[in-house]
Image (spheres, grey):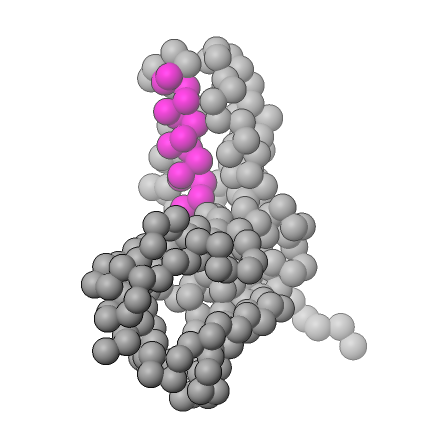
């Protein structure tokens, strides 16, 4: 028995296609910006890579965003510097638009659960994780100096860790991919984080308290979705 197509499912399928096309273009653009010397090179590139997307999906895009993107089709400064600026601006607009169609929250209740697994190849997944990364402000409250760099055993796309140590009373900002995770703080000597097929265990003394976005992680299991909001806070307290 075949499943009937509904207007809602058709819209979701189309959003997947648009998001995939935008992510592929964003990845291509990221590696191409800075290589254009003449205006005709830039226009030729847009004709081959951007215009087909606009012709096929332009009617489904927000008018104001579409207007900003179309500005790239007509340079106001045809010098190399002007082209570079236009390319960087377009890259940001495409990233913003891709987020709108993909939704926030990897493997959440948006279309991304099937979108990332069934539609994108690895390159597209990496591009999404990088462009949709969120920020996490980590505060050291009464603990010895903390060094994050070199102590995270995996290197996920979108993960950026400050190189400098975080001293008592100081804060640092990380960027992290918008993943769902399960955090297990029920053991006395550590916290286990499970996300996207990875399980990471961090040794934490029983006296240390860890709070994420105002909620304690100690003594319980917590499900978090980092993609729900663009900014997060974490406080590690030792006093």
Residue numbers of the magenta segment:
81-97
Q: Quadrant of residue 176?
A: bottom left
Q: Residue furthest left?
A: 169
Horizontal and vertical percent position of residue 4: 68, 71
Name the residue rendered at 23%, 59% in the picture.
170
Q: Residue at image x 54%, y 31%?
A: 31
Determine if the magenta segment contains residue 91.
Answer: yes
Give the main secondary structure, helix, strand or loop, of the magenta stretch: helix
Residue 132 location (% of width, % of height)? 45, 53
Q: Position of residue 221 (x, y in %)?
A: 46, 85
The residue closer to the viewer here, 34 or 48, is 34
Q: Nearer the viewer, residue 192 or 135?
A: 192
Q: Position of residue 212 (x, y in %)?
A: 34, 73
Is residue 80 toward the left or the right of residue 126 in the image?
left
State the quadrant of the C terminus. bottom left
Whether residue 57 is situated above or below residue 149 in the rendered picture: above
Residue 92 lies within the magenta run: yes
Q: In this picture, is 157 found above or below 151?
A: above
């Amino acid at each position: 028995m075949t499943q009937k197509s509904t207007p809602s499912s058709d819209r979701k399928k189309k959003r997947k296609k648009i998001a995939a096309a935008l992510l592929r273009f964003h990845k291509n653009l990221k590696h191409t910006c800075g290589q254009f010397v003449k205006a005709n090179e830039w226009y030729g590139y847009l004709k081959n890579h951007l215009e087909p997307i606009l012709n096929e999906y332009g009617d489904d895009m927000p008018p104001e965003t579409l207007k900003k993107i179309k500005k790239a089709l007509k340079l106001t400064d045809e010098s190399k510097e002007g082209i570079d600026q236009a390319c960087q601006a377009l890259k940001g607009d495409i990233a913003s638009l891709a987020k709108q169609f993909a939704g926030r929250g990897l493997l959440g209740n948006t279309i991304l659960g099937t979108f990332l697994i069934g539609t994108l190849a690895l390159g597209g997944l990496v591009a999404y994780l990088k462009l949709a990364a969120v920020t996490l402000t980590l505060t050291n409250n009464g603990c010895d100096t903390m060094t994050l760099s070199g102590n995270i055993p995996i290197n996920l796309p979108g993960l950026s860790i400050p190189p400098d140590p975080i001293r008592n009373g100081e804060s640092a900002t990380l960027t992290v991919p918008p993943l769902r995770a399960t955090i297990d703080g029920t053991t006395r000597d550590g916290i286990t984080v499970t996300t996207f097929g990875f399980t990471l265990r961090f040794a934490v003394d029983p006296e240390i308290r860890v709070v994420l976005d105002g909620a304690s992680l100690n003594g319980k299991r917590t499900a978090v979705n980092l993609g729900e909001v663009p900014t997060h806070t974490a406080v590690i307290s030792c006093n």
